[in-house]
Amino acid sequence: MKSLADRPVNPVVGVEVAHESATLHVTGTALYTDDLLVRNRKVLHAWPVQAPHAHARVVSLDGRPALEVPGVVRVLTAADVPGVNDSGTKQDEPLFPSEVMFHGHAVCWVLGETLEAARLGAGAVKVGYEPLPSLLTLTEAIEAASFQGHQPTVSRGDADAALDTAVHRFSGGIEFGGQEHFYLETHASFAYVDEAGQVFVQSSTQHPSETQEIVAHVLGLHNHEVTVQCLRMGGGFGGKEMQPHGFAAIAALGAVLTGRPVRVRLNRTQDITLSGKRHPFHARWEAGFDQNGRLQALKATLTSDGGWSLDLSEPVLARAMCHIDNAYWIPNVHVQGRIAKTNKTSQTAFRGFGGPQGMLVIEDLLGRCAPLLGLDPAELRRRNLYLPGQSTPYGQPVRHAERLHTIWQQVLERADVERRREQIAAFNAAHPHTRRALAITPVKFGISFNLTAFNQAGALVHVYKDGSVLINHGGTEMGQGLHTKMRQVAATALGVPLSFIRLAPTRTDKVPNTSATAASSGADLNGGAIKDACEQISARLAEVAARKLNIHPDDVRFANGTVTGIGFHDQDIAFADLVHDAYFQRIPLWAAGYYRTEGLHWDGARMQGEPFKYFSYGAAVSEVEVDAFTGAYRQLRTDIVHDVGDSLSPLIDIGQIEGGFVQGVGWLTLEDLRWDVSDGPHRGRLATQSASTYKLPSFSEMPEEFNVHLFEQATESGVVYGSKAVGEPPLMLAFSVREALRQAVATFGPAGREVQLASPATPEAVFWAIRQAREAMPVPPASAQAGAGPVPSRASSSGH
Amino acid sequence: MDGVRITVNGQLRSGDGAGPHTRLLDWLRAEGLTGAKEGCAEGECGACAVLVARPDGPGRSRWTSVNACLPPALAFDGQEIITSEGLGTPSGPCVGEDLHPVQRQMADRGGSQCGYCTPGFVCSMAAEYYRPEREGSGRRGQGGVQTGPAVVGEDHAADHESGPNGFDLHALSGNLCRCTGYRPIRDAAYALGAPAETDPLFLRQGRPAPPARPTQLTAGDAQFIRPATLEELYDRLEQHPEARLVAGATDLGVEVNLRHERPPLTLAIDRLEPLRVLDVGGGRIEIGAALTLTEVERGLAGRVPLLSRLFPQFASRLIRNAASLGGNLGTGSPIGDSAPVLLALDASVVLASGTGEREVALADYFTGYRRSVRKPGEILRAVRIPLPLAESTAFYKIAKRRFDDISSVAVAFALQLDGGSVSSVRIGLGGVAATPLRALQTEQALAGRPWTEETAAAAAAVMATEGTPIDDLRASARYRSAMLEQSVLRFYAETQSAFSPEVA
């Protein structure tokens, strides 16, 4: 096999091409799971019966009244399950629960000839509940010691001793909110029993293999009796990594029991109230700095809110703990983690997968401590960036740490920071009610699944006799452009134009035992597998060509649909002709490709090892303008320099960076999940369960000027065509906005004062922070009196 | 009557399968046109947007973007609709690629990632592409304009919301994208040139919109009727005072979708001409209750500055293309944004029935949470704004998001100064009580006083005590009160800086 990172001359990777489905998207002809409904007949519709309690025992369930409703066909309950009544992988998520674990938990499902009939039927089902005490907030869970899963520790050096000897020592805490994925396409599954008696499930899933496994275990079937296909998703963001399985199982169960196609498509309210979200976290910390502001020690306890079941909470917590350092060298570390069990939806994967939560802690800490240390926050961050030769608290060397410094310098220059700082100062001096600030924050994000076994992938590549190519791989398309990149990889590896390559939808009967398309790893893993398959085929074709050209097979070159020999200028063979010849020479024209990431090892018990193939780096400079009357703000400009290795597809990568950034800004400033935590009759109900109450970023939240630059000459050895993953890391560039808001708030108060900011930093949160800043009296550095005042903020800290 | 028929993408289709509560979106999708998507079912995300040919003055029509998830399909009987599928086609077996200019720009610039919101964006963008007033939509500004980043500088906010081709970014304020971060979509919008002279959709705007048909359909125990005349409407209301009136369905549609309301009788009134009159007379402006907010905005053309400040903040373009003042005041929500503004303008409403009309001051109209003095059988026919208008006005909407959000607090000021003193003042409030209300105590604290910082500060303190704000998911009660207080200080600061070059 050739080197994974090397590119041939004039490769198709690296060329700026539009999304492979772009023309289908814009014409409304790209099909999503629920669009298949109209192509089928006699489809049944499903509607859940959602419990009105945060925690309750189901004491009775009577589906007979539903059957009286015209058009209701069947009520699905636990008694119907032929296999295992579980929709997860840990046996802690019953598909039909006997104990309601969160407000809105689906206790059974009704199938109807129409959606209206199913809905009315669900309303008629009689369920008896015995309410039980519930825990909703992290504080309640911590006080009740309600935890689930492992309680790991990441440790290096002696944090206690280093804190004792540190010149500056601070402590604090913060509690911050989760995030709803709000993929525009809600969960959807469509199941039927096909003509061969096989259960066929079309599902909007990031993890078809796991959907297949869970459908099979619910139905009591083997995996080979169930096929799952994912055409494409209308967004995933991690929300369709584990969450689709139960909905697919409902559709499949209904299809098997009724013999008719069954459609499960959640409406927005059902989707928000039934499915998991980004984990909210609570953190307490102590940090020590030397006289120059260099971090000496960090002690922290991270508590995530896992909701009612474990789901992916353990790996999310592990990644949070592995990213609490972000891009900073901290010699002495002691970080403990635990997962609260609460009566909320089971929190799950969300772009960044705990990384953003870990990083928020350190970025918040640095933003708060900088004024107390008498340092500009940008300078404090720069001083603490990793240097070559240093390693993370879990023992992984930070390879290419010098890139962090180069990127940092580049983004400062591209953003023209020096000049703009002067402009900002002048603006602020002239505006008593409006203030501007800019902040810079770095990102270092580890790429690979923490669990080593998941870092493998397969592909199936067919070359037909006419030279056209059909590729299949285990990754799913959710808008991230994976299929576009995979076509480019295949075209590059086979030396044919992009138009030769067609990509077929992701199906479990083409590539088995796949990993979730997650952890930003889709292109790394599946690209490796496709390249392997293509190179198997082209090696065989090279033999055929070599005989024809009378040269050594190593000297055969494939480029742009033409095959020639090195140094030949007058003799070449069309790819299609070569393929045709090869067929008649009985050369196999298809191959299964396989890839596993080499060099990974991780001891999950000790939280030590090298779990990541490499780190992705980036830095962002953001400028905001804050209005003191309301706390409202605008994002004036953002500049980003981000490292995607040598880009496989620049238009796609820039789209991922911009989109991830804005999604991160949404999490940090706007998106606010509110549960009813009162003791009233609706305790546990999510108050923000629709688009009118849960606000996503719109046009008004994108930076007015937005410049993204891909770090150049960034070849990453050991990754397909020298590229790096891009899906998750840019989300965390959004800290630059949160830190800019903090600095803008600070201008309303005396210098040297800690500014606390709730997360999300909504206009209301910014308003109260400004009010506190204005009311503050000057205090000497390193002895801040923070946390005073009845601010309804989630953050609190005390300095000493 | 020869059945319900709707023209979609140039093809006449029977709408007989649609019931009174079948939404346009579901009917289109059942017809196999699955381009329009449901993202939220409440008119917030725009994934369901389509184009409808709406009247645009004598002899003309206008492609108007609307959410398909809210209105009943039957409301489009006899109408012409274009969906994303009708704008262009991708290449396929036996078909060459034929993309609309909007689709071309969106596809080439990375304007789609997952693609689910894209058909809706394309329709909203196409409506703005064809907007006759758009600079660059006519003969001027031919050809695509390449855009770089927005202008940098102190007053770039306005630039950033309008392209060099006259594209108003607010045209997309009702479309949400979770993937792209919006920059490529903005670039696509700002790169659009003018429609070709031969563009059939462009040419279609030169002919009148289809007339409304007097649709009547009963299915099960539900009925949809579009009365042909005002008299018929009054008669039906007299017989069925419980009937639900529907114009743009931006409120009723949400109740049907999210709260599963199924009104037995729906009366469509949006095309009744007597409800669509905009009349600027000597002493007052009368605005027909069924005119869409977009039509009012266009018809007034800036004549009422306070309304000009309201419109861009009143929901999204998709909603304003359907919603009416009649609907906003008729539902009487305390967070409807028109009420505070109309209270400050001292507006009144004309309530009409088969037995006659009466005019009620808006300040006397609301009686409780979503309740008013409107009697069963009465309709809200028009809104009247007395002239002359006050010289200094302001509208402050406090929300998390600048585009298309719901107010936690809304405040409207109308102030008249005479020799530096407040000769008259009216302040309308939303979001701080069960109804919209006037800030009467604050008005009292201002009336007759010199317009100074001291007066403003004293009035602000009074303002903080107005209403009975509550804690909810949008804001705390404390914040709401603080926003009332701050609004007076901000209004004062703005009236002062209006005379200085410092205004940003």
Image (cartoon, coloured by chain):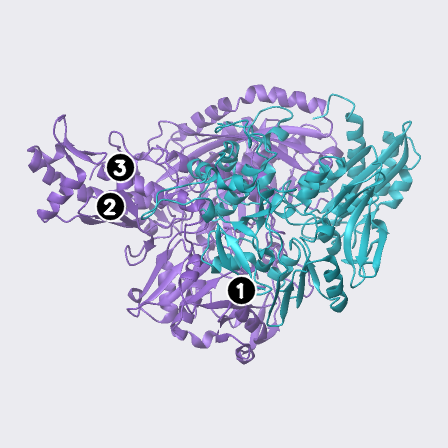
Q: How far apart are marks 1 and 3 (CA)?
A: 49 Å
In this view of the protein, can residue A676 be seen by the observer? no
Give the structural element (helix, strand or loop) at label 3: loop
The residue depicted at 76 percent of the width and 42 percent of the height is B483
> Which residue is disc 3 drawn over?
A497
Residue at the spot of label 2? A469
Task: Provide residue A622's location: percent of width, then percent of height.
Answer: 56, 31
Q: Report x, y in % for residue A759.
A: 61, 44
Instruction: Judge from the rendering whether residue B371 lies leftward or rightward of residue B64; answer left or right.
Output: right
Residue A537 percent coordinates (x, y): 18, 44
- Chain-order first, disc 2 or disc 3: 2
Residues at discs 2 and 1 both on one chain: no
Above or below residue B226? Residue A377 is above
**Residue at 9% in and 36% down:** A546
Estimate the spatial distance between the alpha carbons at disc 2 and disc 3, rounded to whole Å: 11 Å
Of badges 2 and 1, the one in the foreground is: 1
What chain letter is assigned to the residue under label 3? A
Image quadrant assignment for residue A576: top left
- Which chain is the one coloured cyan? B
Q: Say what amino acid the circle numbered 3 marks.
A: Pro
Q: Nearer the viewer, residue A260 or A247?
A: A260
Q: Which mark is residue B16?
A: 1
Chain to which the residue tagged by mark 2 belongs: A
| Structural crowding at the residue carrying mark 1, measured as other residues with C-alpha within 10 Å and reported as few (<14), some (14–19) or many (≥20) | some
Chain at numbered mark 1 = B
Q: Which amino acid does label 2 sit on?
A: Val
Do the residues bearing badges 2 and 1 touch, measured as CB atoms within 8 Å?
no
Q: Which residue is drawn at 19% across and 49% down?
A: A590
C-alpha gap between disc 2 and disc 1: 46 Å
Chain in purple colour? A
